[in-house]
């Protein structure tokens, strides 16, 4: 079995229409996010974010001889927070993130094959933020995330071979994220530390079949600075 997934048979015209529809919706969502980021700063807090994600791909149940391992990838971006009350807020923004993982094929008749996957994404999160401990300024965040796939590569370990998977990867990735964080005030500056868990709900394989279902998951640790413009 090849380490890089193969295309499954489906009608190209139908897939092309679905892809174009998804891309049009993604463009609208990106436009809305950019417009939200450009709203008057007096109504928003701006968050500069940087961190790392511990990422992996799910292993389909049919692949009993495949094991999945974690892989570290970067995360950087900006978010804006719109307060709905003393304890509630909505967050959205633009994030560059790299998801992926390591897959190993174990075959008793052939040498083991391993590959490291790197999928670059431009993500638009839409999070609900709930403050629950005022004294230490702790909060919870939860909500969906939609992302445009920028690139997708598989590097065969032990060789110089690198496979471009962009054509067989779905153009848009959908997922849910939830986490918690703490804000710290130092004189006139506010910083935060946050951890989130991301679970991909859409199949990364463009043309899926029962044996070609790949979903991304990630544990994200980020730090950043909050700029208050109130």
Image (tube, rainbow, N blue to C red):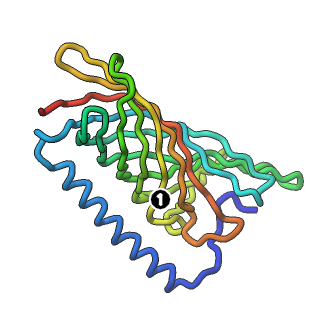
**Residue under the point 31% across and 48% down:** 94
Q: Is residue 134 left or right of residue 203?
A: left
How many numbered tags mark residues here? 1
Quadrant for the C terminus in the image: top left
Q: Which residue is mark 1?
A: 173
Quadrant in the picture for residue 182: top left
Instruction: Give whichever of 168, 225 is nearer the camera.
Output: 225
Instruction: Give whichever of 68, 90 is nearer the camera.
Output: 90
Residue 196, image x and y in percent? 47, 37
Instruction: Give whichever of 140, 62 is nearer the camera.
Output: 140
Vertical placement of 211 versus 160: above or below?
below
Quadrant in the picture for residue 201: bottom right
**Residue under the point 70% across and 68% down:** 210
Quadrant for the N terminus in the image: bottom right
Q: Is residue 192 left or right of residue 43?
A: right
Residue 128, image x and y in percent? 36, 43
Residue 33, image x and y in percent? 26, 54
Q: Residues within 10 Å of mark 1 (few under 14, many from 20)?
A: many
Vertical placement of 230 versus 142: above or below?
above
Q: Is residue 180 left or right of residue 126?
A: right
**Residue under the point 46% across and 36% down:** 179
Residue 125, image x and y in percent? 37, 49
Vertical placement of 137 versus 21: above or below?
above
Give the structural element (helix, strand or loop) at label 1.
strand
């Amino acid at each position: 079995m090849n380490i890089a997934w193969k295309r499954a048979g489906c009608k190209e015209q139908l897939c092309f229409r679905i892809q174009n529809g998804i891309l049009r919706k993604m463009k609208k969502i990106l436009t809305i996010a950019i417009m939200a980021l450009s709203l008057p700063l007096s109504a928003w807090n701006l968050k500069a974010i940087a961190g790392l994600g511990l990422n992996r791909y799910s292993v389909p149940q049919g692949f009993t001889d495949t094991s999945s391992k974690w892989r570290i990838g970067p995360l950087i971006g900006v978010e804006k927070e719109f307060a709905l009350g003393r304890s509630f807020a909505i967050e959205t923004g633009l994030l560059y993130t790299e998801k992926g993982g390591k897959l190993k094929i174990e075959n008793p008749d052939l040498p083991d094959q391993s590959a490291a996957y790197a999928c670059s994404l431009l993500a638009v999160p839409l999070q609900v933020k709930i403050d629950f401990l005022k004294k230490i300024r702790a909060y919870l965040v939860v909500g969906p995330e939609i992302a445009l796939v920028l690139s997708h590569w598989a590097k065969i370990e032990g060789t110089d071979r690198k496979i471009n998977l962009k054509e067989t990867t779905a153009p848009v990735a959908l997922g849910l994220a939830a986490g918690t964080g703490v804000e710290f005030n130092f004189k006139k500056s506010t910083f935060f530390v946050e951890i989130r868990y991301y679970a991909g709900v859409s199949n990364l394989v463009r043309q899926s079949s029962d044996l070609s279902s790949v979903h991304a998951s990630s544990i994200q640790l980020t730090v950043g600075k909050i700029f208050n413009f109130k």
